[in-house]
Amino acid sequence: MRMSDERNKDLEESLEEQEAVQEIKDTEDTQEATAQEEPEESPEPIAGEEETETKADKKAAKKKLKADKKQDALKEKIEELEDRVKRQMAEFDNFRKRTEKEKSAMFETGAKSVIEKILPVVDNFERGLASVPEEEKGAPFAEGMEMIYKQLISELEKMEVKPIPAIGEEFNPEFHNAVMQVESEEYDSGIIAQELQKGYTYRDSVVRHSMVAVVS
């Protein structure tokens, strides 16, 4: 009888333990389901982090503004230098043209000076050849003088030195210098009848005017 009571007691205790375990398990399942149903709340920003981000943005904006100003200043400097180079190149081009023009003018002046000194020699050759008697024109000396004179005239022509047309031409004060007036049945008034000294031009500019006699 006593053993039966003990068995019943043990059975009751076992049932109570099972019920307690089941109750705990049901409670945990309920809590887990509730946790899954509740929406997760987004973490609120921390005040310190907001302040740090704001400072960083301001610093980045300030840095960008400074870089833009530096870029604009650099661009302006480049444009200024380009403008200065263009002006200097233009000035150099003008200087080069002016120098070439002055150099050409100096050469022309020097060439004219030399030609003016040679022309009296040409005059003397012509006077000498004109004074040779007709019977002596075939002599070696006369032929040698003639050859030298032709060579001299040929070299002057290569330098663009040309005689000014005179006899039979209308008087032109730009090329002729009238030293006397004459009467002529062959030419009309204002026409050159005699050439007292031959004139020459060098590259279309007068080196020496022709000395002429004009029909009155």
Image (spheres, rainbow, N blue to C red):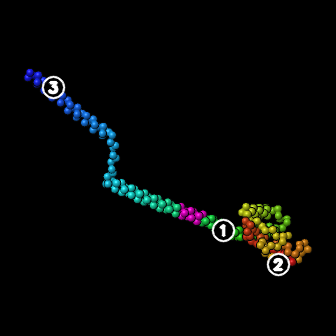
Q: Residue at x 33, y 43 (%)?
A: 40
Q: Residues within 10 Å of mark 2 (few under 14, many from 20)?
A: few
Q: Quadrant of the N terminus?
A: top left
Q: Amino acid at mark 1?
A: Ala
Mark earlier in primary sequence (2, 1): 1
Residue underneath mark 1:
105
Where is residue 124? Give x, y as percent: 76, 70
State which region is magenta.
81-93
In this view of the protein, which residue sits in the foreground, 146 or 26? 26
In this view of the protein, which residue sits in the foreground, 43 or 40? 40
Residue underneath mark 3:
11
Q: Amino acid at mark 2?
A: Met
Where is residue 91? Give x, y as percent: 58, 65
**Is 82 in the magenta?**
yes
Residue underneath mark 2:
180
Rendered view: 45 above or below 118: above
Q: Residues within 10 Å of mark 3 (few under 14, many from 20)?
A: few
Q: Residue furthest right?
A: 185
In the visual, does 160 lie left or right of 214?
left
* Residue 204 sits in quarter: bottom right
Where is residue 109? Give x, y as percent: 67, 69
| Real-space CA distance between mark 2 and mark 3, rounded to the nearest whole angstrom | 174 Å
Q: Quadrant of the C terminus?
A: bottom right
Q: Residue at x 73, y 68 (%)?
A: 205
| Closer to the eye: label 2 or 1 | 1
**Is 94 in the magenta?**
no
Q: Are marks 1 and 3 in contact (CB under 8 Å)?
A: no
- The secondary element bearing badge 1 is classed as helix
Q: Are marks 2 and 1 in contact (CB under 8 Å)?
A: no
In the visual, does 177 lie left or right of 14?
right
| Real-space CA distance between mark 1 and mark 3, rounded to the nearest whole angstrom | 141 Å
- The secondary element bearing badge 3 is classed as helix
